[in-house]
Amino acid sequence: MTSIDVDSELSYDCAFDTTFLFQVAVMANAHQRIVDESLALEPASGEPLSLNELPIDGEGNRRHRLVAPPGPFTLRYRARIELEQEEADPSSLDEKAYADLPADVLPYLNPSRYCESDRLVALAWDEFGHLPPGHGRVQAIVDWVNRTLSYAPGSTGPSTTACDVLLQRTGVCRDYAHVVIALCRSLGVPARYVSGYAVDLQPPDFHGFTEAWLGGDWFLFDATRLAPLSGLVRIGVGRDAADVSFATLIGKAISQPPLVKAVLAGDGATSGNAGGALSSA
């Protein structure tokens, strides 16, 4: 079991009444237990602000809504998480036929805003179609993306898609994840985007990585290799980054760069994935 402390801080200055939807609180599931957490608002002045926690959706995503008046405020989230991930033998993780996929997994085969899998079918089959289906083929996609792309903060923006990234061959964590997801879906492997915290990530920020459906469960992959799989804490999952933005707003506000940290608690230690595959859902 691994214990991880996470901390994030988001600061804004609103020009007028602005509605925010935040997704920074981690999810709880069989492999990820919340030991302790706090979510606080710090207005610079005036009446205290109130967060409205929305119902948890079918994927386990947690969201908080806030209507903020004009002026500055800061949202801060802190939590201690215990991870107890299930490690599986990669050779035992096969790809499932379309007819055998659960209904809730099927949407993760479709093209989405940032993952144009329908446009990458020829590339996916040319590069990976000759490989035996299963975990090894997904890992080959992840390795290829790691080799093919250069990690360059600031090189992409909120409208950059997987196809854009493949053309320019540079990106950040969300772009790496989008390319992996699109190529997996092109081969018939359900894949989805995960937003989260990552232990000792440099530069510190929220992190984006991937889950693929193999052997009847979701398994973690991270093409950036900037953090060990055993140090990834899930915030939310969706078709791509558009579904799990850490902050969405309707109105007008000036934002400061987010302050994000994830560190091992106490004497804990992460060890990559020890050559196995880590289940996360």
Image (spheres, rainbow, N blue to C red):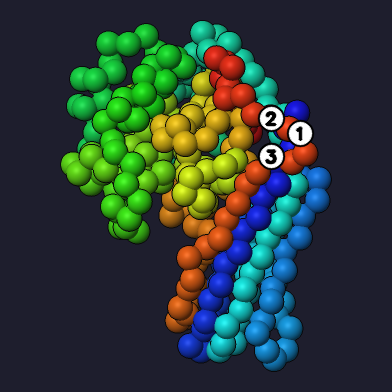
Q: Residues within 10 Å of mark 3 (few under 14, many from 20)?
A: some
The kind of residue on which mark 2 rests is Ala
Q: Position of residue 227 (x, y in %)?
A: 52, 35
Quarter of the rendering containing residue 88: top right
Q: CA distance from mark 2 to mark 1?
A: 7 Å
Q: Are marks 2 and 1 in contact (CB under 8 Å)?
A: yes
Residue drawn at (62%, 58%) of the image: 8
Q: Are marks 3 and 1 in contact (CB under 8 Å)?
A: yes
Horizontal and vertical percent for residue 104?
55, 36
Residue that carries the numbered disc 1 in the rendered image: 267
Name the residue rendered at 67%, 22% in the picture: 86
Q: Judge the density around disc 2: few (<14), some (14-19), many (≥20) Cα neighbours within 10 Å.
A: some
Q: Which residue is mark 2?
A: 269
Residue position for label 3: 264
Position of residue 37 measured from the top left corner of the image (x, y, whole percent): 77, 55
Contact between marks 2 and 3 (CB within 8 A): the answer is yes
Which image quadrant is residue 21 in?
bottom right
Residue 142 coordinates in the image, percent (x, y): 38, 27
Mark pair 2, 3: CA separation: 7 Å
